[in-house]
Image (cartoon, rainbow, N blue to C red):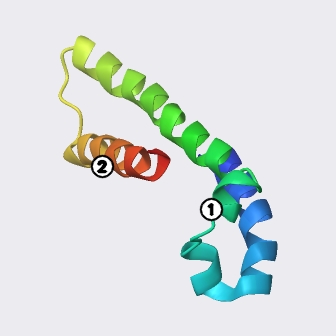
Amino acid sequence: SGWTFVNGVRIMAPIFAERGLYGTICDPSLDVWNTHGMSFWVTHFYISKYYEFIDTFLIILKGRSPMFLQTFHHAGVVILSWAFAV
């Protein structure tokens, strides 16, 4: 997650300085997504969330219940990341 954030900022900061918030977030030409490589880092982030599921599965295999926050976070982040990656 941290590595994805660092690389995402490297891509987005210069674009934000040039285009502003609207031009960066609402990218109708998909320039940020395709040309600048943001698609790789969003997909990388999405796939990395499955690694976090291993932690939850290990807790369940040990016979303990995962914390609500852990379950909610893992499920929510994967769904939102999937929405961004698709």
Tell me the residue that label 1 is attached to.
30
Q: For the residue marked with disc 2, what is the amino acid?
A: Gly
How many neighbours does mark 1 have within 10 angstroms: few (below 14), some (14-19), or many (20 or more)?
A: few
How many neighbours does mark 2 have within 10 angstroms: few (below 14), some (14-19), or many (20 or more)?
A: few
The secondary element bearing badge 2 is classed as helix
**Observer-nearest of 12 and 28:** 28
User: Residue drawn 60% across and 38% down?
Assistant: 44
Q: CA distance from mark 2 to mark 1?
A: 25 Å
Q: For the residue marked with disc 1, what is the amino acid?
A: Leu
Tell me the residue that label 2 is attached to.
76
Q: Quadrant of the C terminus?
A: top left
The picture quadrant where one finds residue 65 is top left
Q: 51 left or right of 16?
A: left
User: Residue drawn 63% across and 81% down?
Assistant: 23
11 in relation to 74, above or below:
below
Question: Residue reaching furthest front?
Answer: 29
21 in relation to 79, above or below:
below
Labels 2 and 1: the sequence-earlier one: 1
